[in-house]
Image: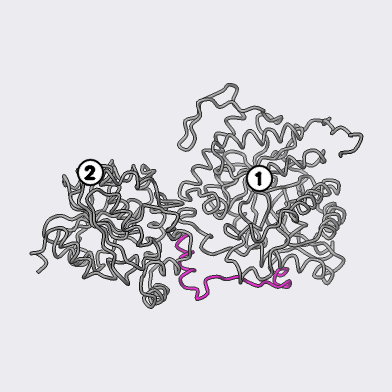
């Protein structure tokens, strides 16, 4: 079993009365009014410290992601964050989860930056490719939702071919035309780093992952029980296509809060979980499902919901007991967390667990303590799960000796 | 198949695919290009026009089947598709009336293949953008707000938003989803794909009608269309919104009839 520390890097000062003054945390929450870059300086370094701490604590991977125009997460470029993490980490794998390939023209940029990361980190990169949320792609980056998936698939094909090719080649795609594809540098991991795909419930995505030997990761923020159906669909696809049911071809994301007791968990984490669900997830319904982003059938359901719900904006003001009961956050004593995760891991059959030990407005010390307690009191008791399977979705060509940053003398002016 | 007692469904082959066209009425042919809401043969303006013209109303690509969009990637492909469609219909040229998205298609057809369009009527067409008059983000809002953008009269807005809440069948909702997807493919994220620089190519005498209270495509665009098209005039109807052909059906039909010189049939 492998454990990764995932950070969403939310803006910690979203206004409490956001729902009265603004319609959405994503796309059009005015940066000039809400985001303070001086505060942002400290926030970035706090968050990077937390991921570096996760490596020291014993996590296998540290994960960053990509979102745009949002207080939900401050990483429009996950590659910049991974680059910043390269120099002060040496063991943990860098799981970039993920680059929104369709947003880059040409997507070769992604091949270049990820190869840079793999070389800089000594072969520690996990390359994630995502379609991206509609808020990021259709509304913030103006990408046509009708052609987004096709553009994404073509971009991923280009990136993989660029990494694997022996010679420069021309690429005559529908969305990208390049006379000479020959990116420098090439990744250390040959023919390519492991590819992880954060995905939804589409059969096409599952088939695509299995056929290309990509890891399928489910990043559900609504607890693991509702996600069970999705993971079942994935495993059925794996079986149908004749692949092995190796648990390491699947990943899952969980919010975790470790404490001495349920009562202490509430005291430590309730406020920050509420902040996440009520502020970071406060999204204008008009941005949820742009035409063409999903099938007409799932868009029909959205239209139906919009038209039959009197108050179509359903901003659930979730409270801690609901958050815990629904499994949105796996919280409690180490025994309780182990027991809940043991069930989840078995039911979903996932070998890679992505852990959010920071969420919402959680202060640095609370987050680092949560990370430490998870690593020391939970991880070891689940570590042996799936030990008889080989993890083929993990970097195996990491350099044995990494270049070390020079210890500098003197002082800056 | 007779639809609504007057329009028949006809299938024509265009570029190796079946395309649906509704056709009916009496008189000279008139091409009706529908809006993003889809082709409704029972809508008042279509019924009224069918009394004076042989209305030929193609279902825009994708509205019945998203696969129809496969070979149509941009407005140029779309304009040429309608050029092909006129061939398939056996119409060398035709008078064309288009509403909203259909108005944009009509203008693009007339700009791309000027000889195909006899006279042109644009009813609250989209297709231009001016920073002073932002077009509403009708593809980035929930359905009730989209409904509110359509109507000029505030009480009608509320009534329509309420009516739609109890009305549509699952099939109608599915059709709506396909229609919006088909529109999005050609206009995302801003419905301005260069039409302004092509307006000068339009040879057809053109009538532009807007509703003064149009909350989706501001009426300020009426004169921008008429200024860009060499032989055009515009009419702005007070109190009406984006659904001006429905909201002011009688007046719009009279204006179209006068413009197309078909007055005697209007008696």
Q: Tell me if residue A313 is in the magenta stretch.
A: yes
What residue appears at the point 61 percent right and 59 percent down from the top-left corner?
A30
Chain hosting mark 1: A
Residue A167 image position (x, y, % from top left): 58, 21
Query: For the magenta stretch, what is the residue range?
Result: A299-325
Name which quarter of the figure residue B26 lies in.
bottom left
Q: Nearer the viewer, residue B85 or A405?
A: A405
Residue labelled with disc 2 = B114
Residue A41 image position (x, y, % from top left): 76, 51
Q: Tell me if residue A332 is in the magenta stretch.
A: no
Query: Is B30 drawn above or below residue B15 in the view shown?
Result: below
Chain hosting mark 2: B
Q: Nearer the viewer, residue A404 or B234?
A: B234
Name which quarter of the figure residue B244 lies in.
bottom left
Viewer-side label of 1, 2: 2
Residue B114 image position (x, y, % from top left): 23, 43
Check if mark 1's residue and mark 2's residue have beta carbons within 8 Å. no
Residue labelled with disc 1 = A77
Left or right: residue A11 compared with residue A301:
right
Outermost residue to the right: A410
What residue appears at the point 41 percent right and 73 percent down from the top-left corner?
B161
């Amino acid at each position: 079993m492998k454990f990764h520390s995932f950070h969403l890097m939310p803006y910690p000062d979203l206004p409490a009365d956001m729902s009265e003054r603004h319609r959405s945390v994503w796309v059009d929450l005015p940066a000039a009014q809400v985001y303070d870059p001086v505060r942002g300086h400290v926030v970035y370094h706090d968050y990077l410290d937390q991921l570096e701490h996760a490596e020291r604590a014993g996590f296998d991977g540290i994960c960053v992601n990509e979102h745009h125009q949002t207080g939900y997460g401050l990483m429009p470029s996950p590659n910049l964050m991974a680059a910043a993490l390269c120099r002060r980490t040496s063991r943990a794998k860098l799981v970039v989860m993920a680059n929104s390939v369709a947003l880059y023209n040409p997507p070769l940029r992604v091949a270049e930056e990820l190869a840079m990361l793999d070389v800089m980190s000594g072969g520690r990169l996990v390359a994630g490719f995502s379609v991206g949320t509609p808020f990021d792609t259709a509304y913030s980056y103006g990408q046509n939702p009708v052609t987004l998936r096709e553009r994404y698939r073509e971009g991923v094909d280009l990136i993989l071919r660029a990494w694997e090719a022996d010679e420069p080649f021309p690429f005559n795609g529908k969305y990208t035309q390049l006379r000479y594809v020959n990116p420098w540098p090439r990744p250390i991991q040959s023919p390519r780093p492991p590819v992880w795909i954060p995905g939804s419930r589409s059969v096409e995505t599952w088939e695509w992952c299995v056929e290309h030997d990509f890891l399928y990761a489910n990043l559900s923020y609504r607890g693991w029980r509702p996600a069970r159906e999705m993971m079942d669909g994935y495993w059925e696809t794996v079986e149908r296509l004749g692949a092995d049911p190796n648990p390491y071809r699947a990943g899952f994301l969980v919010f975790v809060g470790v404490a001495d007791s349920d009562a202490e968990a509430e005291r430590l984490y309730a406020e920050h979980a509420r902040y996440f669900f009520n502020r970071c997830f406060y999204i204008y319904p008009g941005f949820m499902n742009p035409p063409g982003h999903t099938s007409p059938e799932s868009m029909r359901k959205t239209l139906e919901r919009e038209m039959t719900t009197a108050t179509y904006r359903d901003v659930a003001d979730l409270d801690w007991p609901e958050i815990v009961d629904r499994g949105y956050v796996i919280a409690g004593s180490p025994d309780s967390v182990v027991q809940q995760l043991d069930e989840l891991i078995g039911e979903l059959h996932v070998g890679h667990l992505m852990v959010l030990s920071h969420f919402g407005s959680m202060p640095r010390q609370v987050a680092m303590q949560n990370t430490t307690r998870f690593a020391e009191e939970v991880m070891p008791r689940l570590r042996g799960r799936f030990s008889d399977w080989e993890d083929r979705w993990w970097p195996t060509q990491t350099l044995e000796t990494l270049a070390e940053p020079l210890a500098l003398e003197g002082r800056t002016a | 198949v007779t639809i609504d007692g007057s329009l028949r469904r006809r299938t024509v082959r265009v570029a190796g695919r079946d395309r649906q066209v509704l056709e009916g009425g009496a008189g000279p042919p008139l091409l009706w290009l529908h809006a993003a809401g889809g082709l409704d043969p029972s809508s008042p303006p279509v019924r009224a026009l069918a009394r004076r013209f042989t209305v030929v109303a193609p279902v825009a690509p994708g509205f019945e089947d998203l696969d129809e969009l496969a070979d149509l990637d941009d407005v140029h492909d779309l304009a040429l598709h309608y050029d092909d469609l006129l061939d398939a219909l056996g119409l060398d040229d035709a008078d064309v009336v288009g509403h909203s998205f259909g108005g944009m298609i009509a203008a693009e057809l007339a700009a791309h293949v000027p000889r195909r369009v006899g006279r042109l009527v644009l009813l609250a067409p989209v297709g231009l953008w001016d920073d002073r008059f932002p077009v509403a983000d009708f593809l980035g809002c929930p359905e009730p707000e989209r409904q509110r953008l359509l109507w000029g009269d505030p009480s009608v807005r509320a009534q329509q938003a309420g009516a739609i809440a109890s009305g549509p069948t699952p099939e109608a909702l599915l059709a709506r989803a396909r229609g919006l997807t088909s529109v999005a493919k050609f206009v995302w994220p801003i419905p301005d794909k260069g039409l302004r620089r092509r307006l000068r190519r339009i040879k057809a005498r053109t009538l532009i009608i807007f509703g003064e209270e149009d909350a989706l495509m501001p009426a300020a665009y009426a004169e921008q269309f008429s200024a860009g098209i060499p032989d055009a005039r515009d009419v702005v109807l007070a109190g009406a919104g984006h659904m001006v052909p429905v909201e002011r059906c009688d007046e719009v039909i009279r204006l179209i009839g006068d413009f197309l010189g078909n007055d005697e049939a209007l008696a």
